[in-house]
Amino acid sequence: MANNFSAIILAGGKGKRMKSTLSKVLHKIGKRSMLERTIKLLKSIKPTQMLVVCNKENIFNIQKELGGQVECIIQEEQRGTADAVLSAIKSQSQQEETIGIFYGDDTALYRPQTIKNVYLKHVQNQAKITFITVIKEDPTGLGRIVRKNSKVSAIVEEKDAVPDQLKINEVSDGVYFFQKKWLIENISKLSPSKATGELYLTDLIELAIFQNQKVETFTLEDPREWHGVNSPAELVAANLKISKTIHFMGISGAGAAAVAGIAKGLGYKVSGCDQAGNSPYTSKLNIPIEKSHSVSHLEGINVLVVSPAILILDPNNRELEKARSRGIPVITWQEFQGKILQEGKFVIAVAGAYGKSTTTAMIAKILTDAGCDPTCEIGASLLEWGSNFRVGKSKYYICEADEYFNNFLNYRPDMAVILNTEWEHPDFFKNPKDSANAYRNFILNIKANGMLIISKADQNLASKIQNKINIREVENFKIGGLSIIGDFRKENAAFALTVAKALNLNLQKAVESVTSFKGLGRRLEQKGTIKGSLFYDDYAVQPYTIKTTTNALKDKFKNKKVLLVLEPHMPTRLSRFFSEFVSALKAVSADGIYITDIFTAREKSVSDNLSKKLKEAVGPKAQYTGSVENTAKLVAKNLKDYDVVLSMGAGDIYKLYELTKAENG
């Protein structure tokens, strides 16, 4: 059958969510723009005519891109997809019986035969409209195809859907064939949306159904052919369908390294770089890692995955700028994990100001011991794994969900766990209200019919949020003693066991998993012994966790002399919560306290020496000791006075044990 249809390609959208000055359809998938791919696809099918609808701002760049291959039409005002079609109909030739309408971005990865098959079905069934639908595992954010007796009865936007309609996973994807005569007669009958004032093509489907006209659908056999691109993350996903070659910029942190390891395990070709070079988290990845950044790292890659800190603190980095100028998609590792690696997975995400790593690890151990074979990303290494990630083959994906920089909003969990909601990161959240709003938005990200596990104290965060989820209060379990130090960890265990119960796992076996849990690196981790003194190391940075963790260790060694060596983490935190730090340190039961210089991390050094002020405020039990190196010398000198030494902080203080060991020869 000869093709007797003309093609209208919609390319006038501005794509504001792409966060780019470049028109959305001109972003590249592989080496060609989405529009160029769509044009090439349609040329292979040979429609009688092709028209590209542009806007006033992008027509010059589109004409330059296409080099006169296709006629371009201007949509004078951005008034919706149906209005764009109206702009093109005026330039249509007269002989065709059918008009095909294609979104210039969503159509880029289709196979020519698929489009031919849709056109053939449209003609053979003498339909007024035939459009493609896709079965999506997670249709969140998309309109649902409602059927009655297998026929389309409506397309319902997600915001208007009732609970039963939210369960529908069939969606429309942006390829339509219309009987030309019917289209011309009816497109002018559409009314603008009350919400936006725009005219939508999907309203034509509603109109045809109302008129009792024949409307046909073509469901994609391979849903991977359709790839909607409305955000940088979706552009990344499209590129990864072409090639799985990625580079991690800032790979040495716990989260980035874990995600890189998971990606490698899932078949991606991964490389990385970091100003710090290798770290304990990357040393076993078997991934090529360069020290420092360089534009040479971009050769042959499809996607650049970055640490959020680079985007914020070093936005003009040459490697970053060159990637953008070459059209290489740039995405944070949290976006990569949430939008790419977790696609199609049952996601369990653990949030909270403290306790995330331990709880995430306990959940990971429960599911692993139960034979669920989960994929896991954890902010610290499980001592029994020797790693902070795991690549599984099941549907389960467990991850930490960090609130800093709103990173946890990159995840759409099926099950979210919120341990606590204390105000943290004052350099980002300026007040408790900002922090609480971030947690509310995280709750809104839970998938429809998903679950939130939360404490009774924090349930008010979810009480006014009507996003159709199940809310479950954390339960109390009689679990006896844990293998790790600190009864306060029973709270983490309670959340982990509530997850197990919600998943209908064997609860007795889950209890055995948490009670045999051996702990995490840098979470009251026993480092070794120097001249009879035991050394422990912990990551705590907040007043509450500093006090609770130190007192738990002292409680274990009641009759021993315990020295706390604290490296305050970030000037903003210490300055904003100064009185809380003073109260916490006065309340710790350690026999001595050494306070080092502040680890400034991403902040600039401050002229006021807050560490000295903290020492003065805490009183005679505290001593200011300067740099970590100088502190190690002091610890070595006074080691005879202490039986147990606890290094604490999220900066360089983890080096204390090895530095002290070196001082003692």
Image (cartoon, grey):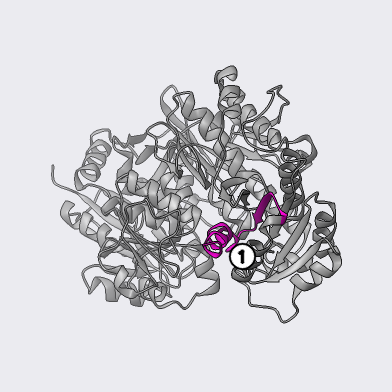
What is the span of residues highlighted in magenta in the rendered image? 641-665
Q: Tell me if mark 1 has few (under 14), some (14-19) or many (20+) residues whose alpha carbon lies within 10 angstroms of its own.
A: many
The question of residue 660 being in magenta is answered with yes
> Where 347 falls versus 269 (above or below)?
above
Q: Nearer the viewer, residue 141 or 598?
A: 598
Q: Nearer the viewer, residue 578 or 468?
A: 578
Whether residue 63 sits left or right of residue 155 in the image: it is left
Q: Nearer the viewer, residue 23 or 192?
A: 23
Q: Mark 1: which amino acid?
A: Ala
The residue positioned 41% from the left and 28% from the top of the image is 151
User: Label 1: which residue?
Assistant: 632
Residue 657 in sight? yes
Percent coordinates x, y for residue 534 in the rendering = 62, 48
Percent coordinates x, y for residue 569 in the rendering = 66, 64
Percent coordinates x, y for residue 48 in the rendering = 19, 56
The residue positioned 66% from the left and 53% from the top of the image is 645
Image quadrant assignment for residue 197: bottom right
Viewport quadrant of the N terminus: top left
